[in-house]
Amino acid sequence: MKPLIPVVLAGGVGSRLWPLSRALFPKPFHALFGERSLLQSTALRAARVTSRPPIVVCNEANRFLVAEQLRALELPWQCIALEPEGRNTAPAIALAAHLAMADAAGAQLLVLPADHQVEDAEGFAAAVQAAQEASEGGAVVTFGIVPSRVETGYGYIELAVAGQPGVQPVQAFVEKPDAERARAFVASGRHLWNSGMFLVDAEVALAEIEAHSPEMAAAVAESVEKGQSDLDFFRLNDAFLRSPNVSFDVAVMERTARAAVLPVDFGWSDIGSWEAVLETAGADGRGNHFVGDVLPLDVDRTFVYSSHRLVGAIGVNHLVVVETADAVLVADRSRVQDVGALVTQLRDSGRSEHSLHTEVFRPWGSYEGVGHGERYQVKRIKVKPGASLSLQLHHHRAEHWVVVRGVAEVTCGEDTFSLSENQSTYIPQGTKHRLRNPADRTLELIEVQVGDYLGEDDIVRFDDQYGRGPR
Amino acid sequence: MKPLIPVVLAGGVGSRLWPLSRALFPKPFHALFGERSLLQSTALRAARVTSRPPIVVCNEANRFLVAEQLRALELPWQCIALEPEGRNTAPAIALAAHLAMADAAGAQLLVLPADHQVEDAEGFAAAVQAAQEASEGGAVVTFGIVPSRVETGYGYIELAVAGQPGVQPVQAFVEKPDAERARAFVASGRHLWNSGMFLVDAEVALAEIEAHSPEMAAAVAESVEKGQSDLDFFRLNDAFLRSPNVSFDVAVMERTARAAVLPVDFGWSDIGSWEAVLETAGADGRGNHFVGDVLPLDVDRTFVYSSHRLVGAIGVNHLVVVETADAVLVADRSRVQDVGALVTQLRDSGRSEHSLHTEVFRPWGSYEGVGHGERYQVKRIKVKPGASLSLQLHHHRAEHWVVVRGVAEVTCGEDTFSLSENQSTYIPQGTKHRLRNPADRTLELIEVQVGDYLGEDDIVRFDDQYGRGPR
């Protein structure tokens, strides 16, 4: 068998899962079901079918999240490839093909979006094996999901004949249908959902992209050639931005003579909306599903997700309620597809709730805003064992640090000293300082910032172990 | 004319306005309409009809709120009377009668619940004048509201004849009716809503209570006689607790031959539920009313109150959504009467969200929890000009104080020193300390508490200018 390299596409935002999923902490990184995030589940699923570590493609802004979540499972990776900006799946698969071929001659790609859910891991493994055999003959195999309901939210793959198992030719790709056509599709037995998962020879994928979109092929090739390794990451050159923004389905599958489809039924969901979360999580006898601190009174067919605060609900029916640190969503379940429109409104009005969470992840750990006023803000900072923030100074604010847990090594001006639990120090405005965790457990501290201007951009960096610039 | 003394009853909790209204910051103190709280509006309404300052009856726990809100309007008060525990309106009116008579011979009482809303201030003033004249003849006058809708939530007052203006005898008091009877009442024109507002000679009120409930009369008389003046307050003796817990309607009005009623129509509401808040605030063309940061998409007949966070709403209808710092309510509008049941569940399960807000008011100012973790919590503390916290110590926690605004005078062990903006200090576990604001503007600081146990009851007080005990 040829070497099979998982390609995990982690570039999606999942805006229909707002307010939980946001650009800077999107859907693949959330643990919606159990303890593992969708990305982690995807990586583990891949690890069961191949011993090759994955190539993960993600946005620059989320690189530390990817690395952190894979590290937490002690899963190695071949590469975390950073797109300067997302250009949809076709260029992402092209760049993964380049990286895979550089690593292993004759590599095959198992392309998996990072934010899908699969219930039947054995069924998945069997399907991958069947697809792999077919792709060795040069087919571009897509996994077609046997529909379990009438669904207007997906594209469909039409088969020549109904009910035939195994890899087979694609008759046609069909755009998202209206309800009537969707009903007919499901009744026909000749239509499958287009899942966005593929198995293809890296060489074939590149040749097809070259044949059907030479502009994309050229942009990706240059971005890889001029790309740079950077710690755990491979940073693509900005040539990548010249690639057309198009899906692998449109760029290749709908045009190639090599398209093949494997009908599968392994409990798949793309978790495309809060409705899909409810379906996958499963409802109780009244049709409800509650996560977190919820107090219901006569509530039916309702999904409540509480992350920070008590949610009391009385006499409501068929709602989705999602509570996060800085935003609450209340929607009728029939309208969950419109959550994306709300997020667009937020973005267009220049607000940060569409992209930022209150907890922000950094290479050295994370921080979370816990309160703010006119001249101050309070943050909880977590620093990973051995990690260090950059040597920096702020022109407009002073900082007070109180160690709550663990040990901090503080550099302030010319001095370096240790603070243990319950000790505190003061960093005057304009003084060079650095915070490091010298110990082997997480350092947790409270930072009180006081000053006229408290923006994140009031920072001058002098030395940064993560290769970040002076601001 | 006899001296007319307003008696403002501010002891109610208003649990049906949860999560905004809570035992420790209840309904009278919230600014639901415009900038003034219901208590402030009530006090101003009274000030327009009499030059005598009010007697305010409230719970011990809310005394500083009352004083602060009246002070903010520069409204003097005759007395803020503190009940050790609420015993409903009859004992409250009895104690106010004692205090009023001690202050002014022949005093009349204008009894006003602190949490009602009146739109037509002139109509109110005219009604008070008419009632005052009648009460001089010895009548106990209640204000009966001309019904504007079929309402099963109020008691009704039956008149002998329909449509007669002016003070007149009461035919009967009628308990809350079912919907059918309520419809008949409204159609008859002979039934008014029982508002809980009264005008009565202090001497008559006491005589009637003595006649119909001698036990109550005795308990209240003793509690006043043994009561103590305490700064701005009059603290009733615990003899008060022996009084039966009963309303003035039941104790006096339903039994006395002196009962009279004045039909009035001055835009009254008791703001008894979120539905009443919506009615009073007024809905827009789609039947919605939004307060705070709300982003609606296809929302109808819905009330959203956002105090801290963005609330996004999609495709919902006929809901009440109330967002506060630590709790969110989502209810169908037809079920707003059941909010109290939810609060009862919270109390019964030992949770604090039924009574505590995150901002807690103290004689010296207020504090608000802004974040907490396993071994720490962060509070924002505001200290009023000239105010001082007690000299105290904590056995289980250390405190770090960072001054954000204003000047702090800190006593820590044997030392006393000043901290200005942006300076900080550390109070070790077990050290006597005191915080004072020596300046003429509010002191604002961030307190980071670190320790094994962070409960409010880990406090030993040595000296307190507000007369609070050692714990």
Image (cartoon, coloured by chain):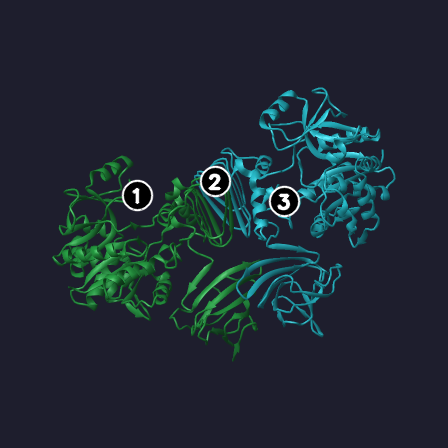
Chain colours: A green, B cyan
Q: Earlier in the sequence, mark 1 or mark 2?
A: 1
Task: Find disc 1 in the rendering and name its residue.
Answer: A153
Task: Find disc 2 in the rendering and name its residue.
Answer: A316
Which quadrant of the structure image shows residue A178? Answer: top left
Q: Position of residue B302 (x, y in %)?
A: 50, 38
Q: Are marks 3 and 2 on the same chain?
A: no
Give me the C-alpha separation between circle 1 and circle 3. 46 Å
Q: Residue at x 33, y 68 (%)?
A: A74
Q: Amino acid at mark 3?
A: Ala
Whether residue A146 is visible? yes
Q: Position of residue A405 (x, y in %)?
A: 51, 70
Task: Find disc 3 in the rendering and name its residue.
Answer: B31
Query: Which of the two residues, B452 or A63, is positioned nearer the viewer here?
Result: B452
Q: Residue at x 71, y 75 (%)?
A: B414
Query: Which of the two residues, A183 or A425, is positioned nearer the viewer here?
Result: A183
Query: Which of the two residues, A145 or A251, is positioned nearer the viewer here?
Result: A145
